[in-house]
Image (cartoon, helix red, strand yellow):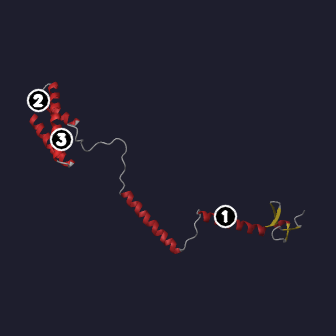
């Protein structure tokens, strides 16, 4: 077969030269038919993608304006959330409020221990006095807790009574 021979296209049945015809899947197809087939295949594929929702259809200018306004509103909302964001602290946290069932904290015991040692008392006697004071503070705290319900008020009253006890030890 030479290049000048004429062959029939299997799709459009037109006689074309060998240069204008290509063999595809054991069929002779002219370049025009091949171009149309590719375009049809692309259109069909894009339609399938649109149906699945992968590709969106082109929007009208009015729809685009609405879409942009929605996006701006979303952006403003996220910016506000970021400004008001408070990080979540995970792991061990220091307790800001004291528990009301406990008598004296470690720091308060340290303060009392230092005061009593400065007065010249022996260590054993200091330990006994701190135990007695912690028992008294437990009783005081239970009284205050039964009288009032507000945590801040309980703390305030307890600090006042603890200050009296410390002054009495001086």
Of marks 2 and 1, the one in the foreground: 1
Q: Position of residue 163 (x, y in %)?
A: 13, 40
Q: Quick one: SS at disc 3?
A: helix
Between residue 12 and residue 146, name the one nearer to us.
Answer: 146
User: Which residue bears the numbered disc 2?
Assistant: 119
Of marks 3 and 2, the one in the foreground: 3
Left or right: 136 as drawn, with respect to 62: left
Of marks 1 and 3, the one in the foreground: 3
User: Which residue bears the numbered disc 3?
Assistant: 142
Q: CA distance from mark 3 to mark 2?
A: 30 Å
**Label 2: how many Cα within 10 Å (few below 14, some 14–19, many 20+):** few
Q: Residue at x 15, y 36 (%)?
A: 136
Q: Earlier in the sequence, mark 3 or mark 2?
A: 2
Cβ atoms at labels 3 and 2 below 8 Å apart: no
User: Which residue bears the numbered disc 1?
Assistant: 45
> Where the N terminus falls, by quadrant?
bottom right
């Amino acid at each position: 077969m030479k290049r000048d021979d004429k062959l029939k296209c299997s799709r459009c049945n037109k006689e074309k030269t060998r240069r204008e015809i290509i063999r595809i899947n054991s069929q002779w197809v002219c370049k025009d038919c091949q171009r149309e087939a590719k375009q049809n295949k692309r259109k069909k594929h894009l339609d399938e993608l649109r149906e699945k929702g992968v590709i969106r259809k082109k929007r009208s200018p009015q729809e685009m304006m609405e879409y942009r306004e929605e996006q701006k509103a979303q952006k403003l909302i996220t910016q506000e959330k970021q400004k008001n964001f408070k990080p979540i602290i995970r792991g061990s946290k220091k307790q800001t409020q004291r528990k009301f069932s406990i008598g004296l904290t470690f720091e308060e015991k340290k303060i009392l221990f230092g005061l009593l040692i400065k007065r010249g008392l022996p260590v054993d006697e200091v330990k006994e006095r701190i135990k007695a004071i912690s028992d008294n503070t437990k009783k005081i705290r239970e009284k205050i807790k039964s009288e009032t319900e507000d945590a801040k008020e309980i703390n305030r009253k307890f600090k006042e009574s603890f200050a009296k006890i410390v002054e009495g030890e001086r």
